[in-house]
Image: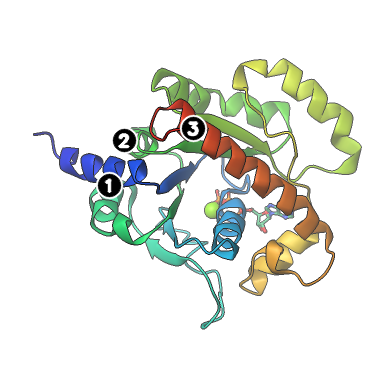
Amino acid sequence: MAPGHRAVDIINARRKAGSIVAVIANGKGGCGKSTLTINMAIGYGLRKQRVLVVDADIEQKTVSKWPRPAGLMGPKVVTWPTVEILDKLAEVIGQYDVVLIDMAGRDDRAAAPVMAIADMLISPAKPSHQDLSELDRFVRVAKVRNISHLVVFNEATREMTGELGQLVKEFARFKPFLPTAIQQLAGYRRAYAFGRGVLEYKGAHPAKENFDRVFRQIDMAIQQARAKSGLVQP
Ligand SMILES: Nc1ncnc2c1ncn2[C@@H]1O[C@H](COP(=O)(O)OP(=O)(O)OP(=O)(O)O)[C@@H](O)[C@H]1O
Ligand SMILES: [Mg+2]
């Protein structure tokens, strides 16, 4: 039996029983992977899901350094090197409803087996021609391996509305793009600094309103991908 084979079986059995696994990845640095991971983790936590966040960026450890106040509802955060994720996850996945993996990104060969156990590969990307061009190889890996892939524009501004439409057209092979883009808002940075997710802002808040839509669309895309994969009955 190939190494890791048993781990994959355990993980897939658990996925079949209902656990969601999403990998947040994009070879490009600074595109918003950790911000998206944290905010999704809080989103699922608010839905009373037990969330595990795997910080695979063992050098930067952005999610591991997120100053989440003790005592608050929140995800369990672990820091695991990419090559150890499958074996380590197999040991604990039974305790979680949702697993979000923040991938360090550049090492494609190590990342591929992890991507293969994901219900969805999510790539935040800045709305720029250059950044989407660099995302091409990821899109190809996902296609070849038949992994559902979702591209989410991050740090969009109001002036970019026309540009987003152009990029969606030009990069139609990247389908699907999430309909709602994550906007560039100070609220995302501020929430991180306080160890919070933007959905935890009290009352109306631009980042909260923006991410509320983004999160619901992402979750729906994940559910659709799961149904399409035959993993769960639609
Ligand atoms: N939508 C946003 N609005 C405002 N600031 C943002 C937004 N998304 C990300 N940022 C900021 O941009 C920087 C990079 O974001 P983040 O750390 O999430 O990216 P990353 O892809 O995880 O980066 P790395 O490749 O270094 O791990 C951070 O300072 C973050 O606070
Ligand atoms: Mg990061």
Element type at marker 2? helix
Query: How far apart are the alpha carbons under marks 2 and 3?
Result: 26 Å
Q: Which residue is mark 2?
A: 113
**Residue at x 38%, y 59% (from the top left corner):** 96
Mark closer to the observer (2, 3): 3
Element type at marker 1? helix
- For the question of whether residue 124 can be seen, the reply is yes
**Residue at x 85%, y 65% (from the top left corner):** 204
Q: Which residue is mark 3?
A: 234
Q: Amino acid at mark 2?
A: Pro
Q: Number of callouts in the render?
A: 3
Of callouts 1 and 3, the N-terminal one = 1
Crowding near pointer 1: few (<14 within 10 Å), some, many (20+)?
Answer: many
The answer to the question of whether label 1 and label 3 lie on touching residues, with beta carbons closer than 8 A, is: no
Crowding near pointer 2: few (<14 within 10 Å), some, many (20+)?
Answer: some
- For the question of whether residue 185 can be seen, the reply is no
The answer to the question of whether label 1 and label 2 lie on touching residues, with beta carbons closer than 8 A, is: yes
Element type at marker 3? loop
Q: Amino acid at mark 1?
A: Leu
Q: Amino acid at mark 3?
A: Pro
Where's residue 174, x and y in %? Answer: 61, 22
Q: Nearer the viewer, residue 163 or 1?
A: 1
Mark closer to the observer (1, 3): 3
Where's residue 123, x and y in %? Answer: 57, 38
